[in-house]
Amino acid sequence: VKQPPLYITTPIYYVNDIPHIGHAYTTVIADVFARYHRLFGGETFFLTGTDEHGQKVAEAAKKRGIEPQEHVDSMVQNFERTWVELGVKPDVFMRTTFGFHKKVVQDCLQELFDKGEIYRKDYEGWYSVSEEIFYTDKDLVDGKSPIGKPVQLVKETNYFFVMSKYQDRLVKYIEDHPDFIFPSSRKNEVLGFLKSPLHDLCISRPKSRLSWGIELPFDTEFVTYVWFDALLNYVSALGYKQNDAASGRTNERFNSLWPHTTHLIGKDILVTHSVYWPTMLMALGLPLPKQIVAHGWWLAEAGEKMSKSDGNVVSPLDVKDIIGVDPLRYYLVRSMKLGNDASFGLEDVIVRINAELANTFGNLISRVFALVVKYFDSRVPAYSRDVEVEKDPMRLELVELAKNLSSKVKARIAKNQVDMAMEDILAVLMKANSYLTVKEPWKTAKVDLSRAGDCLALMLQIICVASVLLEPVMPKKMGELLSFLGLKDRLIGEFASDESQWELLKENDALVQPPVMFPKVEYELGSK
Ligand code: MSP
């Protein structure tokens, strides 16, 4: 069966920020979903990028005494570099200061203005600078924004998008498409939010107050509200309202990929993505994305939210320096149930990495390869032809589990249960380790070589299937391991057509003993 395409996006991050473990989580998970989709043979397009307009950026540039464009050009490198270091490979890195994006935003604004979907009105509201959002009296909690940010009263003339008009249609859409917002607890949250009347969305800022933004095409005294600008990056990146064959940004590509969109976001930006954005799309006459997946927050070790001002922000690159890039990716994928919050503590990271990668997977690899080198001349041994061996219930159970592993993982990924996929793979590796311990091939090799060979052949097949299935999560390490298994020249794409991804190794295939794949992390906590 041919896989449908996948267009997966992360939020485009505020370029002013220094990427922390929360940004790294969303981006790594998106990269992992993209790589799984490619592994399973589907066309994949993966977007990340930066959100570069708005008041905060203008203020930061002013503080540095430089032009906003110069400021964002230097800041964006923090993100670009971090993603390279974390093995994240987006197909496009979007920046809202790209010329083509600004043009698409202006074309959309003009279209909506011409259709009467945007109007001008005097306005008074509570503005939160840090969130770049207007609130009404009713929204405030103890004189602050709903998430506790300071607000200021702002009076001005502005342009509004008739968001309220789409309220009923949106509610119906969400009810008719139960998978549109994932997990369902977040869907219920949005439906709850939509029980109160929806206001129209202020989509402009007067230049007198803010000039760092995209000018409204129908009133040069104003620039576009950052969220209206930023959300449109998801369609401008593909080629919406464009026909530029050289860059690949064409309406044709947009039309083929857009219906297959998954927006991966943190729960902090649920409303902008599941209310503002769908109503904007409705007004533009476009279909809605297939799914919005909202994950929880990484909290600091003590359970409080990470924030720059509290100084408890974890840098992904610091953690990477201690444990390595692939173990960090594995930890992020494995340790947060997608949708829930989790706390990030280095001790937990090290304990888990040592238990699951060093002691379980790494140990299995080194024990098996060492024996195959020693007793089988570095070649894949034959399975036993002895019926007694084949009928062994422990062996039967293990083979069954391993054979079904790839279809199980595929089903998990389809349900966004990427953490559970890791659990499934780990369970097989643990079973394999116990099997090895029980069968003691290092002893049997001396008395019954074919029996030892059977055990090791099975272990190699399991290592092989695990390395294929973990390749999206740990691309560097698993790429190396696949080459030690002699599968280097077979592109990962080729595994896609192999339904079971089972028994990719053949008897007598030559192997090379790898160095220690997952060294135990020895690290004094508090030494940094
Ligand atoms: N610029 C907007 C998004 C516009 S998308 C059209 C924005 N940027 S942000 O820099 O604040 O990034 C927010 C996102 O970063 C969250 O939705 C989440 O993906 C990630 N995270 C930031 N802090 C986080 C945690 N502490 N935990 C998990 N992820 C969080 O909002």
Image: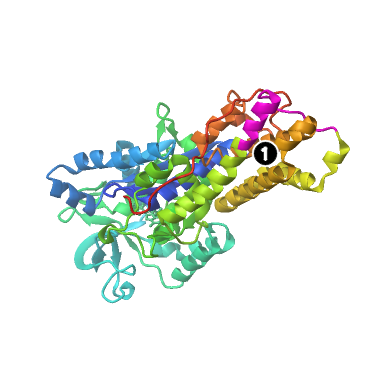
Q: Residue furthest left?
A: 65
**Residue 203 sits in which quadrant?**
bottom left
Asked whether 165 or 428 is in front, the reply is 428
Place of residue 293 in the rendered image (x, y in percent of width and height, measured from the top left): 50, 55
379 inside magenta stretch: yes
Position of 350 relative to 479 (above/below): below
As for residue 348 lying within the magenta part, the answer is no
Mark 1 lies on a secondary structure that is: helix
* Residue shown at 62% from the left, 50% from the top: 412
- Which image quarter holds the N terminus? top right
Residue type, numbered disc 1: Ile
Q: Nearer the viewer, residue 332 or 345?
A: 345
Observer able to see residue 245 = yes
The residue sitting at 63% across, 32% down in the picture is 369
The magenta-colored residue range is 367-385
- Determine the quadrant in which ligand 1 lies: bottom left
Dot 1 corresponds to which residue? 462
